[in-house]
Amino acid sequence: MKEDIKLMKGNEAIAHAAIRYGADGYFGYPITPQSEVMETLMAEQPWTTTGMVVLQAESEVAAINMVYGGASCGKAVMTSSSSPGVSLKQEGISYLAGAELPCLIVNVMRGGPGLGTIQPSQADYFQATKGGGHGDYHLITLAPASVQEMADFVALGFDLAFKYRNPAIILADGIIGQMMEKVVLPPFRKRRTEEEIREQNPWAALGKPKDRKRNVVTSLELDPAIMEQNNIRFQATYKRISENEVRFEEINCENADYLIVAFGSMARICQKTIELAAEEGIKVGLLRPITLWPFPSEAVARQADHVKGILSAELNAGQMVEDVRLAVNGKVRVEHFGRLGGIVPTPDEVLAALKEKLM
Amino acid sequence: MHMDINEIIKPENLVYTKPRLMNDNPMHYCPGCSHGVVHKLIAEVIDEMGIEEETIGIAPVGCAVFAYNYIDIDWIEAAHGRAPAIATAVKRLNPKKMVFTYQGDGDLAAIGTAETIHACNRGENIAIIFINNGIYGMTGGQMAPTTLEGMKTSTCPYGRNVALNGYPLRIAELVERVDGTCYVTRQSVHTPAAIRKAKKAIRLAFENSMAGKGTSMVEIVSTCNSGWKMSPVKANQWMEEHMFAKYPLGDLKNV
């Protein structure tokens, strides 16, 4: 079969992949640099083809609660936004986690804090991987480094979300969202029928047939003894995810003397950095976490056994470096390099930082 | 002469029974509160329309947070104020189902004002049941947007002062002006006649939703005798004298 290859932006790839996945609904609110997701969906009009619902909400708060409503019915629903908008969604995300609902959230990060800038950033690493809203919870956090991965992670995110009944988030940034690359679009999947949803998600609130008890989707439980049990169940889910779903990529890590850990657009920049280093005779490997939560701690720890130093390169003031240091546990030196506020470094800059901080 | 209960309650003798869809869970509502009566009316309407298998209720945050414990249908418990956004998605993703929200005045008229106005403006085919008792009941009687001028609550202990707190917000008048609503009415449940009218209003709202006519809102001016610190009887009298003056009963819109 001929592959469906297109040239498009990362944000557009998300939209096309969502339609092709057989997503039931998208609910969003405009914000730069991710508005092309909803714009593409509105132009494609999937409600006339697959039956997918696309709605522009009155706010990010409403959009995430629309996702909560759709997810409560067992539907495959999603939203996308950028950093300030994702902050607004945190209440709803906490409720989604607390009610054990699957859904897909996309954050095309920009620089903050506050209104910040519309330029790319990775400063929402903590927010995405450590919870973000109130309560003890985690999101399955996927970090795409290409337009292809923007497309591929829609299906991966939805599948993992439904497998574990937990929200998944694609943590991209303004570079990945805006840059154009070749992408092989995934094949079309049929949207699930109501019968299939009822069978696969017996907890879904779709109307109560006479032969089952009523379904109540809620995160509320006033009895602390039961609420503790609920939390223990959530933690057991997070443990299963941590054991089974860690994803990462290693480039030139064998025999490397130094290691760079970087995700998303920063990993793409660092691919060039390790080439420049090799030209100078410095053996540098790149470990790219694909899942930021669960974090590839064991893979990082393995590298720490044979490298002289590790550089965590991020578009922030030092967030992932904390997870790298936890994984390394003092075995070797771990330093951070970052540019802030929407500034994107060159590969040379990263190499210079590596030499200065580690050599 | 001894008679068995089945001999007394023959179908021809039966004048009233607990709605089939109300379950036996003990209610957490205070005696005298309007919530229980409104729950009963909703359960009756769903049963009489024969739509229990197609109905999804959205419960609020507030006293009615546990509405899902009492009416035997599928429920979704919303974050505070977000029920209309949740109902929007549930209805759009399941256009043949009956979707309604059940919300108090803190939930709907304060924190959820944006979600309310915009769901109404989009003409979502949902029914919004709005309990207006002028106070935050669940959290212990604080001032609501609907609290009357001069009315005392725990956060306006000397009475609501409009210079400080603004004016009582009339939500029904607001959404009546919004083009997406097809039916906006204000009812109460303080007398048998009022209960019958309120039930008719809820039925019409549900029928509108199933017919795809737009958004229907049934506001029910209610008592919170605990929050108002009155006996149930006195609360009803006070509601008639004061609440109805600011929130007059009747249809505001029926198109």
Image: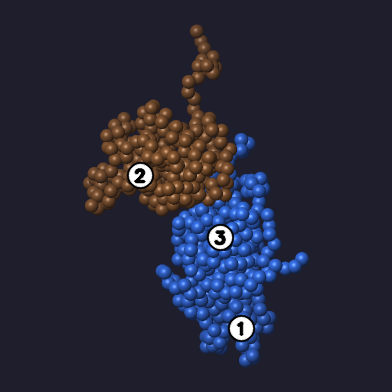
Chain colours: A blue, B brown
The residue under the point 54% across, 18% down is: B11
Cα–Cα span, label 2 and label 3: 33 Å
Q: Residue furthest front?
A: B255
Residue at numbered disc 3: A42
The residue under the point 48% across, 44% down is: B214
Quadrant in which the N terminus of chain A appears: bottom right
Residue at numbered disc 1: A272
Place of residue A235 in the rendered image (x, y in percent of width and height, measured from the top left): 56, 57
* Residue type at the position of mark 2: Glu
Left or right position of B159 against A232: left
Residue A158: name its quadrant: bottom right
Classify mark 2: helix, strand or loop: helix
Q: Is residue A170 above or below residue B48?
A: below
Classify mark 1: helix, strand or loop: helix
Q: Identify which residue, A191 or A342, lies in the foreground.
A: A191
Q: Identify which residue, A336 or B222, lies in the foreground.
A: B222
Dot 1: within a 10 Å radius of its alpha carbon, few (fewer than 14), some, or many (20 or more) residues? some
Q: Is residue B57 visible?
A: no
The residue under the point 65% across, 83% down is: A256
Place of residue A302 in the rendered image (x, y in percent of width and height, measured from the top left): 64, 75
User: Which circle's residue, 3 or 1, is located before the other in the chain?
Assistant: 3
Chain under callout 1 = A
Residue at numbered disc 2: B173
Left or right position of B240 against A322: left
Place of residue B132 in the rendered image (x, y in percent of width and height, measured from the top left): 36, 41
